[in-house]
Image (spheres, rainbow, N blue to C red):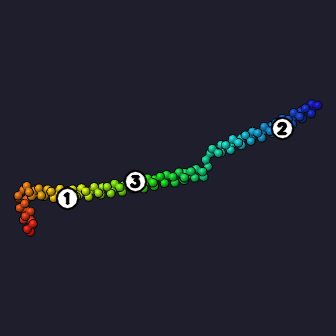
């Protein structure tokens, strides 16, 4: 009877040990799988970096186009302003010559002499 009891206890212990061992291994595998999901593989990292690079290049290109448009608008505005100032300066020079001629008889004589040449 003691032998039978020892054998039953031994079998129950072996069964419980095998069951517990399998449960521990299964739980360990679940933990490893969840940890693996948190790690980023090199391929995934490169894929995300390439996508980020493409997105940034697109934004940079949009900014470049926008800035080129603004620079062109400023250039056109400055060109128009320079032409306007050029006309004003020409008018002021002519006005100054007329004023000098009317106010100074010596200048009038010099201009008369120059025009006769």
Q: Quadrant of residue 27?
A: top right
- Residue 50 pos. (x, y %): 54, 53
> Looking at the figure, which quarter contains the N terminus?
top right
* Residues under numbered marks 2 and 1 in contact, where contact means CB atoms less than 8 Å apart: no
Q: CA distance from mark 2 to mark 3?
A: 76 Å
Q: For the point 9% across and 58% down, which residue is it?
A: 101
Circle 1 SS class: helix
Q: Which one is in front, 105 or 36?
A: 105
Packing grade of label 1 (10 A; few <14, some 14-19, many >=20) is few
Sequence order check, earlier mark of 2 and 3: 2
Q: In the rendered image, which residue does mark 1 sit on? A: 90
Which label is found at residue 2? Answer: none
- Residue 61 pos. (x, y %): 45, 55
Q: In the rendered image, which residue does mark 3 sit on? A: 67
Q: CA distance from mark 3 to mark 1?
A: 34 Å
* Residues under numbered marks 2 and 3 in contact, where contact means CB atoms less than 8 Å apart: no
Q: For the point 92% across and 30% down, which residue is it?
A: 2
Sequence order check, earlier mark of 3 and 1: 3
Q: In the rendered image, which residue does mark 2 sit on? A: 15
């Amino acid at each position: 009877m003691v032998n039978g009891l020892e054998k039953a206890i031994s079998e129950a212990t072996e069964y419980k040990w095998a069951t517990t061992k399998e449960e521990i291994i299964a739980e360990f595998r679940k933990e490893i799988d969840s940890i693996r999901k948190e790690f980023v593989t090199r391929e995934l990292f490169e894929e995300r970096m390439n996508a980020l690079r493409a997105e940034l290049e697109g934004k940079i290109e949009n900014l470049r186009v926008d800035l080129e448009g603004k620079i062109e608008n400023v250039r056109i505005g400055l060109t128009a302003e320079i032409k306007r100032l050029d006309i004003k300066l020409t008018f002021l020079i002519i006005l100054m010559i007329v004023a000098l001629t009317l106010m100074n008889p010596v200048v009038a004589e010099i201009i008369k002499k120059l025009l006769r040449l």
